[in-house]
Image (cartoon, coloured by chain):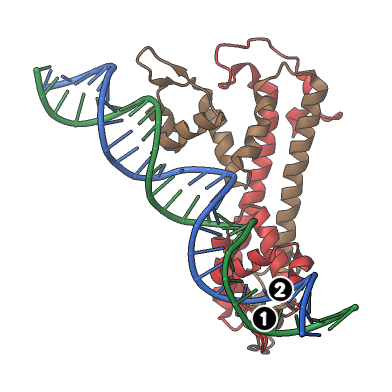
Chain colours: A red, B brown, C blue, D green
Amino acid sequence: MQIGEIASATGLSRDTLRFYEKRGLLRARRSANGYRDYPPEAVNWLRYIKLAQTLGFTLGEIEADLPLLAEPASSAPQLRAALARKLEDIDQRIEGLHALRGELARRLAEDMQACPLQPGQADSHANLNDYSLQGVNITNL
Amino acid sequence: MQIGEIASATGLSRDTLRFYEKRGLLRARRSANGYRDYPPEAVNWLRYIKLAQTLGFTLGEIEADLPLLAEPASSAPQLRAALARKLEDIDQRIEGLHALRGELARRLAEDMQACPLQPGQADSHANLNDYSLQGVNITNL
DNA sequence: CTAAAGCCTGGAGTATACTCCAGGGTCAAT
DNA sequence: ATTGACCCTGGAGTATACTCCAGGCTTTAG
């Protein structure tokens, strides 16, 4: 596959792919004419990168997983440990998102009149019932 | 509270707090001497920002929630809709993280010999049993 | 053969989110 | 009254992750 093909297959730009190569996130063979030549598996790897990235992992963090994903020959215990760390990280983020959800709900339910954003403005207590979410009481989120 | 206090209370730097103010994420009263004066509630708001941010939300996205959190007086249906969008967003991220988890496991289990990162290198099939994670079979993640 | 489309490199520019001065006031204690 | 620990502003600098040329080969279709 050449760069244009893989770009449209992944939704990434050609420039982004070249940038990833510079960073060491993605290697490509070269054809006789100097054009990059990607194996079809690169699509999956790039999708992985894209997903991880939109979820808040930096390219540096993703890069750190690279040996984990690239060298199955590395010792099993090391690999197990690396995978464990990564999954822990993911689980912490999931937890964090649940917390964020709760925080959002709590703020709406309890903290509204004491918001630091509009100092000295509001003291109008809102009715909690006004903030139920499509039938779900936000205090239960 | 003045800037140094709130900085150490939240773990953010003074410069970051001033930067947030420039961006419009955080307002502060001014004392007679011109020093910023924060209400104690600002600590919670900043913690919310920090959490959301480390989870991959940009300041722009967080800023977009600002009226949601700052103006309880806004009409209930609008607020409901905004909250619904935000929670959907969070749920999608959680889903994405679960997918990432699975992807990570799948790659290790199935895709290892066909990694695009080291082209033309490995064909050594690894034993799936080598990649169980602390007793959990990674194929079940 | 030529024109369009696609690839190459190197380097400059952009957006986000800080981070770090310089130069200068304020305040509490000695 | 001066020292040190605060605070202020404006502006420059940094890291990340692209994004966009300029100038120049290669390939494909007419």
Q: Which residue is mark 1?
A: A35
Question: Residue D24: horizontal and vertical position, in percent?
Answer: 60, 77
Q: Quadrant of the N terminus of chain A?
A: bottom right
A4 versus A99 height, above or below: below
Q: Chain of mark 1?
A: A
Instruction: Out of A7 and B139, give the one closest to the viewer.
Output: A7
Question: Element type at marker 1?
Answer: loop
Report if the CB atoms under discs 2 and 1 are less than 8 Å apart. Answer: yes
Question: Element type at marker 2?
Answer: helix
Q: Chain of mark 2?
A: A
Q: CA distance from mark 2 to mark 1?
A: 8 Å
Q: Which residue is mark 2?
A: A3
- N-term mark: 2 or 1: 2
A64 versus B18 height, above or below: below
Residue at 76% across, 15% down: A127
Q: Quadrant of the C terminus of chain A?
A: top right
Q: Is A4 left or right of A86, judged from the image as shown? A: right
Residue A24 shows in this picture: no
Instruction: Out of B98 and A38, give the one closest to the viewer.
Output: A38
Question: Residue B59: horizontal and vertical position, in percent?
Answer: 59, 39
Q: Is B99 left or right of A81, judged from the image as shown? A: right
Q: Residues within 10 Å of mark 1 (few under 14, many from 20)?
A: few
Q: Residues within 10 Å of mark 2 (few under 14, many from 20)?
A: some
Q: Quadrant of residue A50?
A: bottom right
Question: Residue D9: horizontal and vertical position, in percent?
Answer: 40, 27
Residue at 45% across, 31% down: B18
Three-letter code, disc 2: Ile
Three-letter code, disc 1: Tyr
